[in-house]
Image: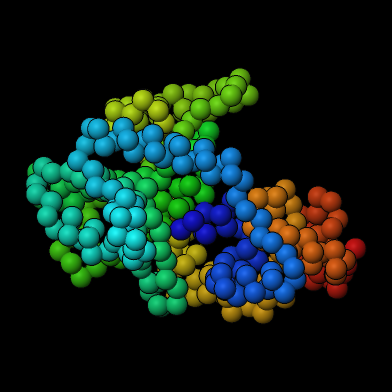
Amino acid sequence: PTDLSQFMRLRQCQRYLRLQLQGHEAVNRVFRDLDLQQQPMPPLLTRSGSRFEHQVEAELARQFVVRDFGAERERRKSQRSDNPAVLEVLNALQPGERRLLLQPRLRIDSADAVWTMQGDVDLLDVRRDEDGHLRVLIADLKSSALARVEHRLQVACYAEMLDALVVGTPNAFASIDLAVLYRGEVANDAFASEAEQQKRVADRTRAREVYGLTAGCLEITDDPQLYRTEVRALVFDRDSQADRIAEQPFSEVPWSLGWQCDSCRYGPFCMREAAASDDLSLIPFLQPAEKSALRSCGVTTT
């Protein structure tokens, strides 16, 4: 799920997704051979996200019945999935009961068993209503000013995984809501549009009403099916985009350079290749579609 979210944030860079699908060992070997280092996530962003998550989790634990799977894995020194434990929680829920699960690790195979998807869900809010129906809200915690498309796509991944997890069990869901619980704070709201400011106020009110949070904004996705359909096309369907990208020869996978590459772990690799081959990506402001058009006409270098 994190890989697909990053794929969207990097303007759907197919080379990024191909390198991720190859596996870390193969990519690390390529980087070692070229004497390159992968570009890490800036520590300031990592620390900011961690602080926000801990703050929200602490507030939730004071008000709800919470099970922290992340803490349990740390105590057990285990990296295994929590699939069986999540199913146990669902089976044990009685009508009218509600549980908040923090950081459960789900692991699911795609329909054609080509890909294994694994991810830690920040917040899994499950309840059984008085009629005995299971309802769930899946939320991802983001230390960002706004909820973005890639955040919603990541939560949609978890929804597909959760649905796949309960296949063959009596735990079908009556509803699955997708949400992003984002920090929402900005240094100066004057730079935000009026619509953005109003949305933050509404989402902050919702976070307070639904979870009693003093920090953060809760956006519940209006059209979850739209994002779930996109996830299926990316990974879960047969002949998915991931299947097609993985089957292409590496040299034919489209790629380009842009502002988004500054935060991509593979940026040094693409920069080195562009310089060595005099690639069209060295032309400032050249768009991916323009690069593809030039290459189709036989123009491959500056």
Residue 48 in the image: above or below residue 186 = below
Residue 294 appears in the picture as rendered: no
On screen, residue 171 versus residue 21, left or right, reads left
- Residue 139 in the image: above or below residue 288: above
> Which picture quadrant has residue 210?
top left
**Left/right of residue 211 with respect to residue 36 in the rendered view:** left
Q: Residue at x 85, y 69 (%)?
A: 277
Question: Which residue is at the far right?
Answer: 302
Q: How is the image coloured?
A: rainbow
Q: Is residue 62 left or right of residue 145?
A: left
Q: Is residue 296 left or right of residue 72?
A: right
Q: Is residue 160 above or below residue 208?
A: below
- Residue at 46 percent across and 58 percent down: it is 1
**Image location of residue 154, percent across then percent down:** 45, 53
Q: Residue at x 12, y 55 (%)?
A: 92
Q: Position of residue 175 (x, y in %)?
A: 25, 50
Residue 261 visible to an observer of this rendering: yes
Measuring from the top left, give residue 235's x and y in whole percent: 47, 67
Question: Which quarter of the figure has residue 301?
Answer: bottom right
Across the whole image, how many numbered discs are drawn on residues? 0
Quarter containing the C terminus? bottom right
Please name the residue shown 22% across and 60% down the image. Answer: 85
Could you tell me residue 253's position as x and y percent?
68, 71
Which residue is at the far top? 190
